[in-house]
């Protein structure tokens, strides 16, 4: 190691450059002192039960508010962002027939993509700084990642709880905890939300009851991704025709309207739909076999919902679209040996039998 790299500022500059070379769009350095403000907010949400059935978030909560506890001797975190902002003129897949899926989940699993890049970056750092410790995280450990990334200057937490900067909020986060002392990046000083509340007003389920608070029990992403088994009646109408995740609060954000992310960023097809999923409509998803599920979704973040969950969600979306052309597929699914799929297909057939109309908001679930 050269004498110049003994300086925390020089080391930080070097590692930030390496992060971009590793395929990330932006990077910043965060210090690891306890996250008092964000940590207190997290603990209050736990007490209020706003995480629904996601009990793992309550395990050893103290580690989440003390980021230095995640690696012995940790002194800094290299925080990275990978953009999935839609390109100008990028077409929507298959129009109304295609299952409605959050944009980040349409291509390869970002966990795998970002973790591979972080591990390569980690190896490069260890080679350059013998004895340095490094541990990567991509949405898999007890990390309050948005707060840490905000500390690293990658944005500010918006009213919809997403991280936001002047390029918008269409980006994913990862962290590399390091035992190296690095000069921290400058946090974003400005408030990008101001008086705007479009995300709160646009949420069709009231999942954002107040700025910077998300109620998972009302969140479409929670019900279509994290919840297992039967959906309660109100959740079925709540999710509309989304089958995995939801983008509504990001789509209405003014900062996401101007396509600020450069086209030449290193996407390499990561967030584009592969051909075998472009052809998959709601009926195909509802009837997908185990082999078909494994081949189509093995590299997709959508596998988190499981085959049963995706088929359940497809059945519910059909009922909420109230399109009679789905009746035959739902009749077949009603005979499924998966009781969850069968019961949701039955519910949707009852919806088709009534005059439910097209997908609509569900004001009855608001307070």
Image: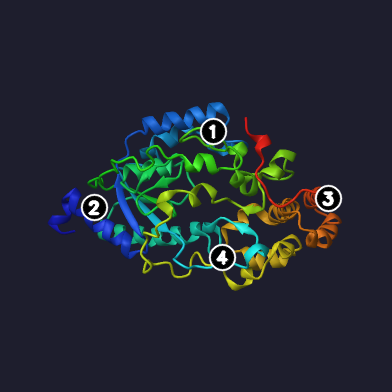
Q: In x, y percent, where is residue 192?
A: 36, 43
Would residue 54 be seen by someone viewing this image from the given angle? Answer: no
Q: In x, y percent, where is residue 330?
A: 81, 58
The residue that disc 2 covers is: 12
Say what secondary structure mark 2 lies in.
helix
Q: In the rendering, which numbered label is found on residue 92? A: 4
Q: Nearer the viewer, residue 249 or 38?
A: 249
Q: Residue at x 53, y 64 (%)?
A: 108
User: Farthest residue toward the bottom?
Assistant: 275
From the image, state whether disc 4 or disc 2 is nearer to you. 4
From the image, state whether disc 3 or disc 1 is nearer to you. 1
Direction from residue 265 to residue 311 in the image, left or right = right
Say what secondary structure mark 4 lies in.
loop
Direction from residue 90 to residue 25 in the image, left or right = left
From the image, state whether disc 1 or disc 2 is nearer to you. 1
Would residue 83 be seen by someone viewing this image from the given angle? Answer: yes
Whichever of labels 4 and 3 marks the residue nearer the N terminus, that label is 4
Q: Is residue 267 above or below residue 159?
A: below
The residue that disc 3 covers is: 346
Whichever of labels 4 and 2 marks the residue nearer the N terminus, that label is 2
The residue that disc 1 covers is: 209
Distance CA(mark 4)–CA(mark 3): 30 Å
Q: Nearer the viewer, residue 339 or 262?
A: 262
Query: Do tag 4 and tag 2 residues touch (Cβ < 8 Å)?
Result: no
Direction from residue 166 to residue 58 in the image, left or right = right
Whichever of labels 3 and 2 marks the residue nearer the N terminus, that label is 2
């Amino acid at each position: 190691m050269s004498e110049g790299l003994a300086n925390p500022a020089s080391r930080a500059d070097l590692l930030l450059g390496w992060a971009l070379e590793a395929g990330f769009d932006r990077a910043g350095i965060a210090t690891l002192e306890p996250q008092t403000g964000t940590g207190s907010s997290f603990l209050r949400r736990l007490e209020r039960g706003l995480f629904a059935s996601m009990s793992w978030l309550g395990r050893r909560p103290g580690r989440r508010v003390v980021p230095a506890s995640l690696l012995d001797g940790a002194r800094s975190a290299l925080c990275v962002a990978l953009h999935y902002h839609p390109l100008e003129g990028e077409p929507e897949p298959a129009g109304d027939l295609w299952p409605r899926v959050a944009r980040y989940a349409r291509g390869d699993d970002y966990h795998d993509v970002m973790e591979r890049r972080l591990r390569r970056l980690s190896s490069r750092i260890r080679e350059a700084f013998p004895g340095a410790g490094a541990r990567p995280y991509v949405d898999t450990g007890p990390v309050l990642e948005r707060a840490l990334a905000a500390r690293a200057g990658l944005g500010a937490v918006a009213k919809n709880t997403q991280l936001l900067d002047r390029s918008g909020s269409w980006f994913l986060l990862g962290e590399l905890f390091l035992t190296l002392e690095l000069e921290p990046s400058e946090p974003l000083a400005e408030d990008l939300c101001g008086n705007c509340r479009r995300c709160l007003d646009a949420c069709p389920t009231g999942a954002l009851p107040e700025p910077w608070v998300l109620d998972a029990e009302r969140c479409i992403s929670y019900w279509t991704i994290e919840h297992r088994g039967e959906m309660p009646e109100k959740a079925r109408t709540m999710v509309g025709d989304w089958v995995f995740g939801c983008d509504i609060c990001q789509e209405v954000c003014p900062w996401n309207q101007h396509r600020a992310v450069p086209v030449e960023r290193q996407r390499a097809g990561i967030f584009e739909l592969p051909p075998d999923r472009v052809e998959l409509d709601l009926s195909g998803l509802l009837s997908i076999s185990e082999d078909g599920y494994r081949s189509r979704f093995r590299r997709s973040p959508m596998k988190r919902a499981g085959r049963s969950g995706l088929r359940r969600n497809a059945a519910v979306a059909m009922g909420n679209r109230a399109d009679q052309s789905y009746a035959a597929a739902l009749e077949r699914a009603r005979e499924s040996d998966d009781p969850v799929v069968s019961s949701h297909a039955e519910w949707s057939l009852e919806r088709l039998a009534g005059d439910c109309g097209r997908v609509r908001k569900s004001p009855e679930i608001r307070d």
